[in-house]
Amino acid sequence: MVPGRWLVRALHSSGSRLRAGVRRPVRRETRDDVEVPPLPSTSSVPDAQAISEQFLARTGDLEPGIEVKELPQIRREFGRRYEARYSRPSRVWLQRWWRGRDEPPERSAATARLTPGALTLRPLAVGDLVLLRAHAAELCMCVDVPVSTRDPRYTFATVDGSLRFGSRSAVLLRIPRDLPAELALPAPLLVREAQHGFSPVGTIKNRADETLLLPVAARRLVTSGAAERISQSAWALLPVVLKKLELLHRSLQDAAGPQPLSFFDLVLMVQSLELSRAVGTRDADRYVERVIADSVATSQSEIDASCLLACYWGLQAQQRSHLWGDITMSRALLSPVAVTVLPFKSQHLFYAKLKEELKADGHVKINEFVRLANNGRYRELAQSFPQIIQLFKDYAAGNLQNDETAVSLIASIFRRIHEFADDDVTRDKCEQLLSRTLPEDAVENPIHYNYALALPGSSLRCRASETVYELAKPAELEETAVERFDFGELPVYCIDSEDAHEIDDGVSVEDVGDGVYRVHVHIADATALFAESGLNEESGIRDEILGLAFERAFTTYLPDVVVPMLPKAYCEAGDLGKHGHKTRCVTFSVDVKIFNERIEVLYETYRIRLGLISNFPKVTYETVDRYLEDADKGKAVTPVVRDLQKLHLISSLLRKSRIFRDDAVVFGSGFNQGLVALSPVDREISFFDQKETASTLLVSELMILANTLTGRYFAENNIPGVFRCYQTLAMRDQAEREYENMKKKVKKGVLPTTRDISKLSSLMNSSFYSEYPAAHSMIGAKQYLTVTSPLRRFPDIINHLQIQKVLRGLPLCFTQKDVSRLLWHIQYRDSVLKNAASHQASYWTLKYIKKLLKDTPDMKFNVIITSVSQFNMVKCAISDFPSARGTLKLKPGAIKVPAIGDTVKDCKIAKIDCLDGLLELEL
């Protein structure tokens, strides 16, 4: 049993406040100049019957439910209610968690410091402190993880013990934090409130007759302390942090255009900056520059949690002044990873001046703009009012962060233009107006001007880098002292689509005998395009093209544009597939043994070599599928087809092994449906399903094999590299059982249906990059390090540079600290491009649906439910267009509320905005 004195101590604060309601001190009050006499002492209070006769009798039947009680009775009933609602749940909770120690668990202390690397060690879990989108003024604590696919929400406790429910998308910022060791996780902090006969004090989650309770003892000892102290400390720091952010912005901003900055770098700068040295001293500017240069975050950098929180709030506040742009979130880490630094002159000063000008002289400029628009003279607007056009462009592109004044100005203009006067002011309407100002047949996608996305047309900086790319050509480098293995006439199959932008991988196979096959994965040697002088010890990167490639980090693939990571000339020089031309490559080889429809990878035979390949039989995904299908039908088998059959068999068995031995999760063709495609000529929108075929399985499994084996090689040899990781989300009870049941079905060959994927999607995490060899549980790899796309991914270039040095016995290009410094920019670009791909898929899909509605206004759609019902609304996706996601308004008083994964038919679209991704439906 828990000693009673500990329970009393744990409950003292809350209990005393509640009991104070009984023992109020006597006081004199005045109201409306009428003196209210003091309450009589208990000794002079008449008995209940006297009160009934003197007071209640005068009210007659007006208040039939009132019962007059003696004070001792009130005290007894209050004690029983307090015991049932608060004391007993806390006592049971303490008994459950108690470990027979002489002392109770210490009250949770504030997490004073954290490291960025802690975010990569585990996903959101009980004990983590978070900032919620709907509760952004103080931290909350995660107190429970999803328990069912029918309700995949987490439970969060505010400082005062109130419970909030939300998905991972509700989290703006996460501070990883372990609970005290005395608490025997994973038992929940929450308890189900008992049926005690009194009005419940818990919180309803799903059922009105079932409430959840965070016991007072749990709140006092575990959930409130750290969240409250860090939040209060952050608010106290905020004025100083705001001043520091302003000072840092002066040195960080660049007139050439917006640029990203690691969020953790910025927090370190704020921590290190001393205002007394940064303001009013002779070397103030040099001091600030030194702080910036020295504040480069690694995974092990110590960061003050209160300063981190204050920086986030400060950035949001200064977004209104156009000092800082978008704060980029990593959905895998649930943390900001970067912020866009805006140029002072072209953003802050531009908008400050524009707002004054538009309000001056009775809004004369707005009046003239509106007059031209109402007369249909839209083409003149771009020439006469470029500043207002820029305002509209930034709004449509999503560059106006938290600037209510600018949005208000836009609204005031639209309200006076006849064509738009009755419409809601949206980003779509801005796009519509902007399209009127363009030359005939010209089409612009506003998203291309988004500063965080950083496409070539978005700023002077991006246009300059594009100009460099257009002129860049790789130098003819003479390799000395580099031994390359010449694979001679060994056929190398570069299986890709006909319109592939880069061809950076090929595969081949050799029959060694006795059921053993030697598999080779040949990868374009992108590092051979750069001179060694392009590397240095400080950052590993000095070559201008290599530096610009690092800024881009990945090739950008959007439905209407592809922006390569490397210049076109470099991609062409490094591409594989030029038949008869000896091409440099890095080859990853391993023997596999096939027996009894099983496969064993003989890791001891694994080799990495610099190579030369030249025999490239012409194949595409389509031709490989046709060759294999014809062979299955008994048609003649050529040597090429025989190789492809062997590779397909090996790939199929590798897939099977990953599922059965390594617990990998495979979705098959049900995952990528309704993908957007645009015609390059007229930008006609169409959709396709990305189906898995024999050829795509062959390529993907062999690339996974190469990346998995290389991850193991880096880990075993302690080579710093950039790993790709995936962590299964924390879940329990039915959710955990359903997730495991899905994996069991996959092992039986039953892949998840679209409905299954809808139910499980909220329990799926996103992958992320790490400097440490953590697992990729979705693929089923203990370590996973990408090396198969160096023309498209900068992490692969980093890993190739390391491999080059290892093979030649030279010092590594990058130390562990170097990799850690480079990692956060890679993480940032990965998040930006994922968000952009999702946003663009939604944008083009909604444009297509909008066009359908123009022709058929009453068109109805079937939707799949993707969330639990809240306030009579559910999130959903249109069945035929999975990228069209929105909300469905349910009928009031509906007997059956649809659950996640259910299909609701015949829904009408009530509101649609393509650029905002807004879609509202109703029955």
Image: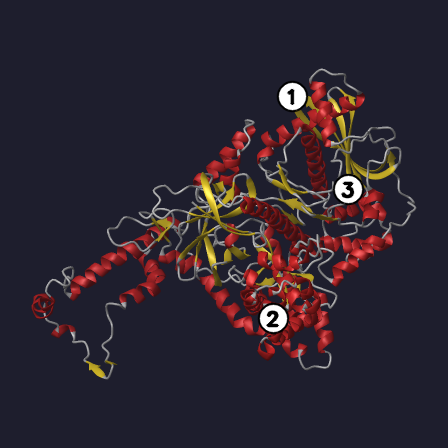
Q: Residue at x 42, y 45 (%)?
A: 923
478 relative position to 517: left or right: right
Q: CA distance from mark 3 to mark 2?
A: 42 Å
Location of residue 36 by image quarter: bottom left
Q: For residue 502, which numbered disc appears in the image?
A: 3
Near mark 1 (Cα within 10 A), the count class, few <14, some 14-19 or many ≥20, is few
Q: Is residue 141 above or below residue 57?
A: above
Residue type, mark 1 in image: Glu
**Number of the front mark, 1 or 2:** 2
Horizontal and vertical percent for residue 116? 61, 57
Residue annotated with mark 1 = 597
Horizontal and vertical percent for residue 11? 34, 61
Near mark 3 (Cα within 10 A), the count class, few <14, some 14-19 or many ≥20, is many
Q: Is residue 768 above or below residue 411?
A: above
Specify the color scheme.
secondary structure
791 relative position to 323: left or right: right
Horizontal and vertical percent for residue 702? 71, 33
Residue annotated with mark 2 = 321
Q: CA distance from mark 1 to mark 3?
A: 35 Å
Q: Is residue 267 visible?
A: no
Horizontal and vertical percent for residue 180? 47, 54
Q: CA distance from mark 1 to mark 2?
A: 65 Å
User: Outermost residue, bottom direction?
Assistant: 33
Q: Are marks 1 and 2 in contact (CB under 8 Å)?
A: no
Q: Is residue 648 visible?
A: yes
